[in-house]
Amino acid sequence: MIQTLKNIFGIGPKVDMGELIAKGAIIIDVRSKGEYAGGHLKNSVNIPLDSLSGNIKNAKSKDHPIITCCASGMRSSNAKSFLKGQGYTNVHNGGSWFSLKKYEK
């Protein structure tokens, strides 16, 4: 029960996003195409949240690291939940795309 609540609210050890990115995590930006065109991480893939269900083909496997991002972290949280529900086991909410920019190389 406690672990379930921790999973729902994202409580627990923090993930090193920089390490995940350095090791080849797929970064999925779930903002609209227009938002993405206004700025994005250079190695990210734009799959708007409302079309995620039909377009999640870029993952190498269901356990390959995936980081979702958006403008604030709300849509990316929804994307993470959706992907987890589809059986992806190594999905992380990166929050704002801009906060991940410091990990770009």
Image (spheres, helix red, strand yellow):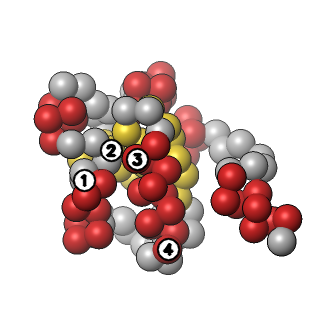
Q: Residue at x 51, y 69 (%)?
A: 84
- Badge 2 amino acid: Asp
- Could you tell me which secondary element the residue under label 1 belongs to? loop
Asked if the residue under mark 4 is in contact with the one under mark 3, i.e. CB atoms within 8 Å, the reply is no
The residue indicated by pointer 3 is: 75
Q: Which of pointers 4 and 1 lies earlier in the amino acid sequence?
A: 1
* Residue name at image x 30 percent, y 54 percent: 49
10 Å crowding of disc 3: few (<14), some (14-19), many (20+): many
> How far apart in space, not on screen, are marks 3 and 4 (Cα)?
15 Å
Quarter of the image containing the C terminus?
top left
Give the class, few, some or many, for how many residues have Cα within 10 Å of label 1's Cα (few <14, many ≥20): many
Image position, residue 54 (x, y; %) = 23, 71
Percent coordinates x, y for residue 96 in the rendering: 44, 32
Q: What is the number of the mark on residue 29?
A: 2
Q: Secondary structure at mark 4?
A: helix
10 Å neighbourhood of mark 4: few (<14), some, or many (≥20)? few
Q: Amino acid at mark 3?
A: Arg
According to the image, label 4 marks what residue? 85
Q: Is residue 75 left or right of residue 56?
A: right
